[in-house]
Image: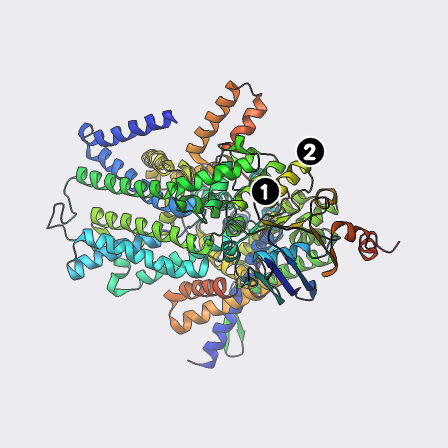
């Protein structure tokens, strides 16, 4: 195995890891603010991908150009979903919450299949097609752009959370719902906001992915499990943790595939997941349970 | 309650009489599928419904049962009846392994761990030569009859499935009446309070899981003997795990007959949507199925049985002279799964 | 002869925060001991150490000569510590009787016998009319008494009660006081955290006062009420 192959694998792991991080950040935010595990999160990504695809197929608009629109639409969708469905299960027993988001997951997949058929779609010849040459190896340009895009969005989210009043309110609700409420922060507004941002992040990831990953109704399934692993490793509720863990998981997955075999990639990631659950359930940066 | 005993009796009579009245293989097969779904739903119910540990990876136990009995048969000539029991024991033992590590975790964590474990098990079997990899295993059908647990007619499988369901329900009933039943319910409702009255919640969660795994695995062996072919996709899939849980949730978690009712309703809905829409390949049956899950989870968390109980309480309260609001509140309170009245809100860990 | 409950130099630290510092006192068999102090004094934390929900960072806790500090809550329950929580935490899927029954199962595994005992304890707290009603239909004050009955069914030597009288109206407070006195008559000791002083002062044999994690006074209710240190702690620096 050459040093080039190793470096290339490492780099591609980091790049896909950045996408994982972006998806996971949305998921961890929802969990941190309202303690609900959103099994339908992968479907936000899927919808983001389809949004990019249809805007490209119907109006010949490049995914990078339509990314802001995709993000906005997914944000609105997330808020709408909260208002229509999630709001009703805030105080429901965990089993009901799990099944609600699980049911939504299946529902969105089914609807996507119904409206857009199960065919695999791809976006060819977008602005970012082609590859980037670095030293002795090359990376796909869409992947590199996606990685950069993920960093940009993550930074934007971080700034929002830590430098704006609204973001601070969100963080306050996440750390102590009761105290935040006593300070006059409307919990429901914060929950809706969390869902909106969560969906937007996953949608952004989808938009970025659409330039190089196939688009199909079940695509969320590929990412939801990994997103859980990342959130778990980073620490439920920690955005910074999700970022670091995302990159780590991306690298582990790709390296594991290289060293042990691609068919075991998922098993390695899952084993990591279980190990974290067993030995350090609070992850890298979460609160101890 | 006399009405429910009457209903129970009627259902039992229907179940016993059905094979003599219905001869069409299609309907008998449908009935067998409903019975099998009810049986594994009842098995799931032990740990998911009564003890409140929402496993979404139970297919692992189903598959373990199916593979164990099949491999013991094809490689060592073990009688499938013994193989079935062996499969149950294997599943129960293996459930101890991951229960030991995962039960210390709060609700969501446990559920996710179960999904992860089931996926790992599926990956392992898909890549394991001895177990036939993705190609799967077949069961020979030359020898037939009761001893071989292979039959040419569907009716015999009907009796077998009915018997296993009855066995599983009997076990559930026994647990419900014993101290285990109360301990499971305590763990589900208030784990910290349960510990404060001396309940070792880790141990009893494990007991629930072992029992559940055992009966689920038996269902897996039955499936293998009926279909005569198993592969990771059919006996280890996450879709199967969902179905097992859904059957109970639809019918009523933590109730004895919830899984049976849920199974009948689900089988009917599935078959109807499949025959009406399924052929198009457009996933309409999935949409209906998923929509059902969401509606039940959001609006009817206590399932069909819970809904009937609430209605009965509401009617009784009205008869006792309560106002509409009071009756509604009483019905809500009677619903075992309604959100508890906490003096302060917020997740307490 | 040693006391029923012995706390020796119990300290509890969470990261940089010290919740309890060097707390020592005894509870004798059948005594009613009140644990009072301003908010944040560390009362519930101390409770959690006795009941097994937390392990002390330093010091020891003995019940009947047996070390219980650092043990799990279920082991402490088995050793004879019963407790209630600030939030009643009754089993909402069960009837009132079933709640108490589940407690009785600790000492009597056979359900019919446990049910009989549960009936007795339910009557003891004057809640027998709720026997077959879902626990959720009861008021907060009733649920608190139910939780007490449930804990009593485990046949504890010591019952820890965490703010059982909070938010109750005067007649409900009287009902609870009644129950506590009846518990004492059964020979069960009670360690009670309470803010409702008019409830605990009249019935306690001894009062222990905590402030900012430390014990600042211990004695009869009258002595403690007159203690200038205690008055200062409650009223602050005016």
Cα–Cα span, label 1 and label 2: 44 Å
Whole-percent x, y for residue B327 in the image = 54, 24
Decide: is B219 above or below B312. below
* 10 Å crowding of disc 1: few (<14), some (14-19), many (20+): many
In this rendering, position of residue A104 left or right of residue A84: left
In this rendering, position of residue A89 left or right of residue B243: right
Q: Residue furthest bottom?
A: A2
Question: Which residue occupies 69% across, 57% down?
Answer: C42
| Marking on residue A82 | 1
Q: Mark yes or no: residue A140 visible.
A: no
Residue pointed to by mark 2:
C171
Query: Observer-nearest residue: B68 or A53?
Result: B68
Q: Secondary structure at mark 2?
A: helix
The mark tally for this picture is 2
Quarter of the figure with residue C230: bottom right
User: Same chain for marks 1 and 2?
Assistant: no
Question: Which residue occupies 22% across, 55% down?
Answer: B69
Question: Which residue occupies 38% across, 49% down?
Answer: B241
Decide: is B257 above or below C106. above
Question: Which residue occupies 89% across, 53% down?
Answer: C238
């Amino acid at each position: 195995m050459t040093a080039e192959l190793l470096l290339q694998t490492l780099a591609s792991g980091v790049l896909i890891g950045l996408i994982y991080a972006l998806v996971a950040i949305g998921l961890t935010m929802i969990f941190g603010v309202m303690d609900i595990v959103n099994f339908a999160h992968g479907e936000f990504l899927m919808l983001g991908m389809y949004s990019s695809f249809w805007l490209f197929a119907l109006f010949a608009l490049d995914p990078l150009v339509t990314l802001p629109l995709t993000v906005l639409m997914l944000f609105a969708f997330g808020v709408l979903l909260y208002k229509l469905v999630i709001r009703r299960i805030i105080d429901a027993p965990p089993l009901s919450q799990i099944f609600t988001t699980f049911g939504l997951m299946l529902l969105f997949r089914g609807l996507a299949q119904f409206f857009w058929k199960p065919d695999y779609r791809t976006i060819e010849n977008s602005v970012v097609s082609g590859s980037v040459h670095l030293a002795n190896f090359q990376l796909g340009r869409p992947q590199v752009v996606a990685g950069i895009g993920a960093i940009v969005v993550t930074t934007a989210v971080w700034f929002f959370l830590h430098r704006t009043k609204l973001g601070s309110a969100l963080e306050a609700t996440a750390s102590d719902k009761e105290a935040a409420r006593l300070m006059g922060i409307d919990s429901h507004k914060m929950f809706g906001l969390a869902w909106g941002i969560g969906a937007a992040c996953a949608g952004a990831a989808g938009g970025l992915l659409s330039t190089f990953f196939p688009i199909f109704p079940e695509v969320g399934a590929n990412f939801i499990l990994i997103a859980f692993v990342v959130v778990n490793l980073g620490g439920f509720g920690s955005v910074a943790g999700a970022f670091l863990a995302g990159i780590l998981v991306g690298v582990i997955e790709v390296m594991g595939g290289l060293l042990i075999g691609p068919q075991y990639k998922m098993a390695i990631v899952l084993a990591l997941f279980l190990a974290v659950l067993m030995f350090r359930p609070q992850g890298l940066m979460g609160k101890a349970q | 309650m006399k009405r429910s005993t009457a209903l129970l009796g009627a259902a039992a009579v229907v179940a016993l009489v059905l094979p003599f009245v219905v001869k069409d293989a299609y309907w008998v097969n449908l009935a067998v599928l409903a019975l099998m779904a009810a049986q594994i739903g009842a098995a799931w119910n032990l740990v998911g419904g009564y003890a409140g540990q929402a496993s979404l990876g139970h297919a692992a136990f189903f598959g373990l049962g199916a593979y164990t009995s099949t491999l013991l048969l094809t490689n060592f000539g073990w009688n499938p009846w013994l193989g079935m029991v062996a499969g149950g024991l294997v599943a129960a033992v293996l459930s101890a392994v991951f229960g030991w590590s995962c039960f210390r975790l709060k609700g969501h964590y446990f559920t996710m761990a179960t999904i992860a474990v089931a996926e790992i098990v599926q990956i392992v079997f898909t890549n394991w030569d001895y177990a036939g990899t993705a190609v799967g295993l077949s069961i020979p059908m030359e020898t037939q009859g009761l001893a071989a647990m292979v039959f040419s007619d569907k009716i015999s499988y009907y009796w077998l499935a009915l018997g296993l369901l009855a066995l599983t329900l009997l076990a559930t009933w026994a647990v419900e009446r014993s101290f285990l039943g109360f301990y499971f319910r305590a763990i589900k409702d208030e784990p910290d309070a349960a510990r404060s009255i001396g309940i070792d919640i880790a141990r009893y969660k494990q007991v629930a899981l072992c029992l559940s795994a055992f009966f689920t695995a038996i269902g897996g062996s039955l499936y293998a003997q009926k279909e005569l072919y198993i592969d990771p996709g059919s006996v280890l899939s996450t879709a199967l795990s969902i179905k097992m849980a859904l059957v109970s949730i639809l019918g009523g978690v933590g109730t004895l007959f919830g899984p049976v009712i849920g199974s009948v309703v689900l089988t009917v809905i599935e078959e109807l949507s499949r025959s009406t829409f399924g052929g198009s390949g457009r996933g309409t049956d999935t949409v209906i199925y998923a929509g059902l899950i969401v509606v039940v989870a959001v609006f009817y968390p206590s399932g069909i049985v819970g809904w009937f109980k609430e209605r009965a309480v509401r009617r009784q309260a009205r008869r006792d002279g309560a106002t509409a609001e009071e009756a509604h509140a009483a019905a809500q309170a009677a619903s075992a799964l309604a959100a508890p009245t906490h003096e302060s809100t917020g997740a307490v860990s | 002869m040693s006391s029923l409950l012995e706390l020796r130099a119990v300290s509890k630290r969470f990261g940089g925060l010290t919740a309890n510092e060097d707390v020592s006192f005894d509870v004798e068999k059948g005594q009613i001991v009140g644990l009072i102090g301003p908010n944040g004094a560390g009362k519930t934390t101390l409770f959690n150490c006795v009941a097994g929900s937390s392990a002390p960072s330093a010091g020891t806790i003995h019940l009947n000569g047996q070390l219980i500090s650092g043990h799990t809550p279920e082991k402490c329950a088995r050793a004879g510590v019963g407790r209630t929580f600030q939030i009643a935490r009754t089993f909402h899927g069960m009837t009132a009787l079933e709640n108490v029954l589940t407690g009785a199962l600790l000492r009597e595994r056979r359900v019919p016998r446990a049910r009989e005992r549960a009936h007795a304890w339910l009557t003891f707290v004057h809640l027998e009319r709720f026997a077959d009603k879902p626990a959720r239909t009861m008021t907060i004050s009733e649920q608190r008494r139910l939780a007490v009955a449930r804990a009593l069914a485990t046949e504890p030597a010591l019952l820890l009660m965490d703010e059982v009288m909070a938010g109750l109206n005067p007649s409900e407070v009287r009902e609870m006081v009644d129950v506590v006195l009846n518990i004492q008559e059964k020979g069960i000791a009670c360690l009670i955290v309470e803010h409702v002083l008019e409830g605990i002062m009249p019935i306690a044999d001894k009062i222990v006062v905590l402030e900012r994690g430390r014990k600042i006074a211990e004695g009869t209710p009258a002595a403690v009420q007159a203690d200038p240190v205690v008055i200062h702690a409650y009223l602050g620096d005016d």
